[in-house]
Amino acid sequence: MARAKKHNLSESCIDGILDNKRAAKSAKTSKNDSEQHLRAEGIYYEEEGLQRITPYYHKFATHAKGRWVGRTIFEVFSKEFRDRSVEYYEAAIEQGLIEINGEKVQKDTIVCNSDLVTHYIHRHEPPVTTQALGIVEKIQDGLLLIDKPGSIPVHPTGRYNYNTVTKILEIKHGYKTLFPVNRLDRLTSGLMLVGLNVDVARRMERDLTNHRIQKEYVCKVKGVFPEGKIVCDQPIRVVAHKLSLNCVDREQGKPCLTEFELLSTDGEQSIVYCRPKTGRTHQIRVHLQFLGFPIANDPLYCNREVWGDSMGKDGVLPPKKQSVEAQTIEEAVVADTKGMSGKMNGKRDDDGDNEAWKSVVQRMEEWKTKQELIEHITNTVDPTTGAQVCEKCSSPVLADPTPDELCIWLHAWRYSGPGWSYETSFPKWAEGTIEHIERVKYQAGPSE
């Protein structure tokens, strides 16, 4: 059923829309009731040691892209969004979960220019730790200091919406307007500065940018970390935005500096005090990997399957996959570099990218795909044999994360600025080492 624009509807189109409204009414009520029911009954619940969210319908809406215009709605979804099956989109259209301008559609409904396309997705948020998001202090001038547990992202992103710092602060603590100043990674725990108004947030961000705020972290690394003050000043750059992969690059990396000092060791792993003087993404994690002491449970930078036996120490990259194409590329790189080793300052191709990084990116992509496949095979079975799938959307019920997968052993311990200093307690994996801080810590205050 082709559809004209709203200002030029035929009588048959009008009759069809009226029929669609009646047919979609129950489906739309069900979708809306899902969100309302979630808030009315309580969004969060705990089960088997994890904080969970009852699955709910989440509304995604966007105006039609130019390349969608003139195509059927079914073709657009089945060709443009391949994360779900053709059968799923057929059922979603039939159930009224896909709409145009708020109206139910058919498979052959044509997408027009400026149409508002909506998809109600049955969302399954990953569980997070039951450890409470702690309020360290609320300062009168509009600054909130919190202790973020690992596993919780700061903002709604990807599969996470309610299990995020900003949503938890809003729903459990009543804070409606929030402006996070320092954004810790999802798996990183520790102190966060959150502005309650935009002016305070901007002032604190300026202080961070101008190095007037000193950051102090603790971490648990693989191996026996050397004693004394260890400084790493290797430059860092992003090599794969989609994978959140950042690495040392001596040619195009941005200036970085981190100071480290050993707190304690058991002969296999070490608790290390960290003082980053710059604020690059994954700076502490990348510098520790470069030094040969990656954070012991870091899935990105302490991953032998991705980095090979060297684990990225001293910038040594793993060999390329031995396909015909890879061998040809490798031979070309070796020839061009005239015997240069596969270090992180390898020769780049014409577009400014580092040819040597292709192996790491490829390995990381393959590793992540493998983890997803393992989860899918482990937890998804054909429905006739008792599959662990959602009865509403047929999504596989994935395995819960293990305690070590809920966090990495990296904790933002203390932040200090002109006339102020705030800190959290040490995490459990670092208990018993805080007394060593006085022995190794530097004078708190602005960075040099």
Image (spheres, rainbow, N blue to C red):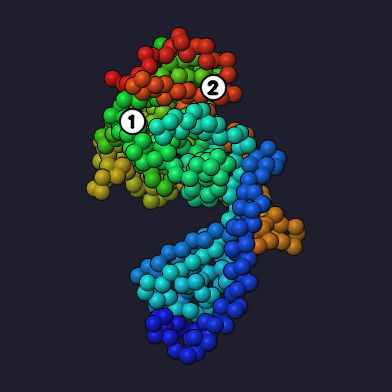
Viewer can see residue 219 = no
Horizontal and vertical percent for residue 31?
A: 60, 64
Q: In this view, does 343 lie above or below 440?
A: below
Residue at 31%, 25% in the rendered image: 212
Q: In this view, does 84 lie above or below 25?
A: above
Query: Residue 205 is drawn in which quadrant?
Result: top left
Residue type indicated by callout 2: Phe
**Is 162 or 91 nearer to us in this picture?**
162
- For the C terminus, the quadrant is top left
As drawn, the residue found furthest toward the front would be: 140
As drawn, the residue found furthest toward the right would be: 385
- 325 relative position to 86: left or right: left
Horizontal and vertical percent for residue 275?
A: 39, 22
Give the mark nearer the N terminus: 1 vs 2.
Answer: 1
Horizontal and vertical percent for residue 338?
A: 25, 36
Residue type indicated by callout 1: Leu
Residue at 59%, 47% in the rendered image: 126
Label disc, if present, on residue 412 of the rendered structure:
none
Residue identified by numbered label 2: 426
- 172 relative position to 361: left or right: right
As drawn, the residue found furthest toward the bottom would be: 11
Horizontal and vertical percent for residue 438?
A: 46, 10
**Is 371 or 363 nearer to us in this picture?**
371
- Element at badge 1? helix
Q: How many marks?
A: 2
Residue identified by numbered label 1: 208
- 23 relative position to 145: left or right: right
Q: Is residue 256 above or below residue 38?
A: above
